[in-house]
Amino acid sequence: MKNVTDSFHSLGYWPFAGSFGFNTDILATNPINLSVVLGVLIFFGKGVLSDLLDNRKQRILKTIRNSEELQEGALEQLEKARDRLRKVEMEADQFRVNGYSEIEREKWNLINITYKTLEQLENYKNETIHFEQQRAINQVRQRVFQQALQGALGTLNSCLNNELHLRTISNNIGMFGTIKEITG
């Protein structure tokens, strides 16, 4: 392992032939690499990301509309329950002597059932919205990662060709010849 490390370490001390060589100045190379990667990501991922977000937004809005329709239905049920409650209250006045406690229990049962139904619908709406948001975030992350990976692979494949390999080999042979002449 030490020999491998030493061989990479010694690459920084080789004399350079032409414009080919290793740049060991990390401060000079990192901003360039980062700007290229970010530029590629922004250029290729901008349209897809906005389309994904628009689609996700439409789905979330549709889910919200559906939840609001469910809530409106629940409000209608609540209004019907209130109408029934008014009827029960009117009957309670008429039958107060005969069964006041039974009517009162029925009234509270109707109210409790209605409020529980509303709470369940509200919880369902909130859970649906949260689930859709998480799913949208996960899909966007996966899509961006795939596009970045595809862009990087495309860049690598386009840069590695026979001409580049032959030029590198030729430069290295020339470097070794120069080193042999200097030492020989």
Image: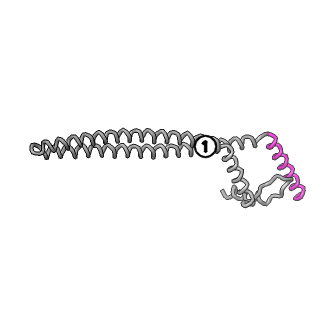
Q: In which quarter of the image is the N terminus?
A: bottom right
Q: Does the magenta stretch include residue 159?
A: no
The residue depicted at 41 percent of the width and 44 percent of the height is 125
- Answer left or right for 65 relative to 86: right
Secondary element under disc 1, as helix, strand or loop, is helix
- Where in the figure is residue 91, as x and y percent of width and height? 17, 41
- Answer left or right for 117 relative to 132: left
The residue depicted at 87 percent of the width and 59 percent of the height is 183
Q: Nearer the viewer, residue 38 or 156?
A: 38
The image quadrant of residue 131 is top left
Q: Which of 58 and 86 is in front in this view?
A: 86
Crowdedness near tag 1: few (<14), some (14–19) or many (≥20) residues, C-alpha within 10 Å: few
- Where in the figure is residue 173, as x and y percent of width and height? 85, 48
Q: Nearer the viewer, residue 35 or 79?
A: 79
- Where in the figure is residue 70, as x and y percent of width and height? 39, 39
- Answer left or right for 10 relative to 54: right
The residue depicted at 77 percent of the width and 57 percent of the height is 23
What range is drawn magenta here? 162-184
Amino acid type, callout 1? Ser
Q: Is the magenta stretch mostly helix, strand or loop?
A: helix
